Image: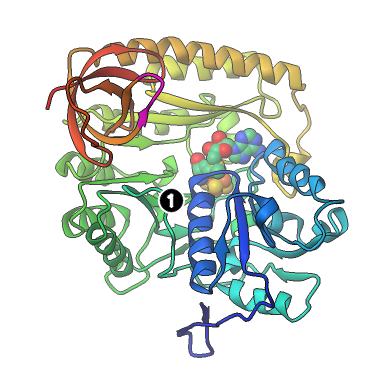
Amino acid sequence: MMRGPSGALVLITLQWSGVKTFYIETFGCQMNAHDSEKVVGTLLSQGYQQVPTPDEAELVFYNTCSIRDKAEQKVFHRLDQFKRNGKGKTFAVLGCVAQQEGEKIFEKAPHVSLVCGSASYNKLPELLVQLETGGRRVTGLSLDTEDTFETPFARRDNPHRAYLTIIEGCDKSCAYCVVPFTRGPERSRTGESVVAEARELAKMGYTEVQLLGQNVNSYRDPSPAGWDFAALLRQVAEKSGLRRVRFTTSHPRDFVKDIVDAIDENPVLCNHVHLPVQSGSTRILDAMQRLYTREEYMKRIEWMKAATRPIAITTDIIVGFPGETEEDLEATLDLLAQVRYDAIFGFKYSRRPNTPALALDDQIPEEEKTRRLAIVLEKQRAIQIEQNAAYVGTIEDCLVEGFNKATGQWIGRTSQHKTLNFLRPGSGQDILGQYVDVRVTRAGPNSLAGECVN
Ligand code: SAM
Ligand code: SF4
């Protein structure tokens, strides 16, 4: 699928001389996972066949992440494994490392033939034709696109919960972050196309949809309707026929009270908000160019705590940003105690190319970052034990997502995005994908356990 001169989508049929099998491995966030679903769907629609291992594949894709140095190194380790024994295969690097490193990848890994960033995925079929006709160093690296990668072919991995992109790219410039360089400027899809896709997904049997974007809160419908994110949430919840709608990720600066009101009014909207804070110190937030103070962030937490529905709140924390003092770390620990998050993702600051923080003095040594992260995670673990204990005795509505053969427990997901493992005695019935009520009987730091009551 590609855009013709009129902007219309046209199908290109590839006649790849014998090369029809592909393998794809995905690194990183949900945005990457969903991009891969779209890439897979596009390739399948072109007659390619997906295989489960790179050994069986003629075309090997790596959809990469460069958010931290470790993530970036993973793809080069993978490619190294094929330096000698990759003959006859074609290697393609997609995603954030592709965009960030560009043609340098051909120097580092000469057996790579295609390098393509996410903003150019709608050109993939065209780029594959170039490969087919003998191209050796094919690139799709332009970021100046108005397009979003909308395709009717996404091949979704999960049969019950579907990802749905509403906005691509990011217009913020957090001092540590590569995303604006790897995913380009913000582009929102029309509200109408989002609602139509959500409806289509409901018709196909999906019951839960997760709306995706680097900053969903700055969503703005480009059509005359001009919906903001809260309006889009209401429309999707009311018009799609879905049972659950969730979203990620929110930037605190653009998180308005109307979003909390929409969640409070409509039970289809899951009562969980991931609101990355990064640090509890206003001084560090300022250095990070996050565009809010600790107090402004806490205001948003208060809106959620005042809601009628109990809203689960999760966050991201970075420790060891340049110049972070013991006092700043204390402020972060104090924030954890004040907010009492349901879960956090903690990261050690990683220096990234092109980012403003690269030039900052006072980098924190690696072992000190490790120490700080351990303190943060330990503090949060104690909070989660207490938070989850409060659910014992409650009955939760769960989407059944899996079955653990080893423990004989079903794996459920609550609207608040908690994992609830449960027994269902006396029934061998397959309940995957169904919604059941589960009484919580035990709680650990990372999950709940219980028994099905229906
Ligand atoms: N757009 C989201 C936001 O504004 O919060 C975040 C997207 S980013 C893919 C996910 C998380 O990775 C961030 O919230 C941040 O905690 C972490 N992260 C990003 N850059 C990082 C870096 N250079 N070092 C460590 N963690 C980083
Ligand atoms: Fe990165 Fe900040 Fe954009 Fe999130 S808002 S993707 S952290 S630049």
Residue 10 position within the rendered picture, expressed as x and y whole percent measured from the top left: 48, 84
Foreground of the two, 357 or 287: 357
- Position of 109 with respect to 384 (left or right) is right
Callout 1 environment at 10 Å: few (<14), some (14 to 19), or many (20+)?
Answer: few
The kind of residue on which mark 1 rests is Asp
Q: Is residue 215 visible?
A: yes
Q: Position of residue 169 (x, y in %)?
A: 53, 58
x, y percent for residue 373: 61, 19
Left or right of 342 on screen, residue 430: left
123 or 349: which is nearer to us? 123
| The C terminus sits in image quarter | top left
Secondary structure mostly taken by the magenta-highlighted segment of the chain: loop
Q: Is residue 231 above or below residue 153?
A: above
**Label 1 sits on residue:** 157
Q: Position of residue 14 (x, y in %)?
A: 60, 80
Outermost residue, left direction? 454
Q: Look at 58% across and 65% down and name the residue there.
A: 119
Is residue 181 shown to the viewer in this render?
no
User: Secondary structure beneath disc 1?
Assistant: loop
Q: Quadrant of ligand 1?
A: top right
Magenta region includes residue 231: no
Q: Is residue 331 left or right of residue 15?
A: left
Residue 264, quarter of the rendered image: top left
Read off the magenta span.
403-407
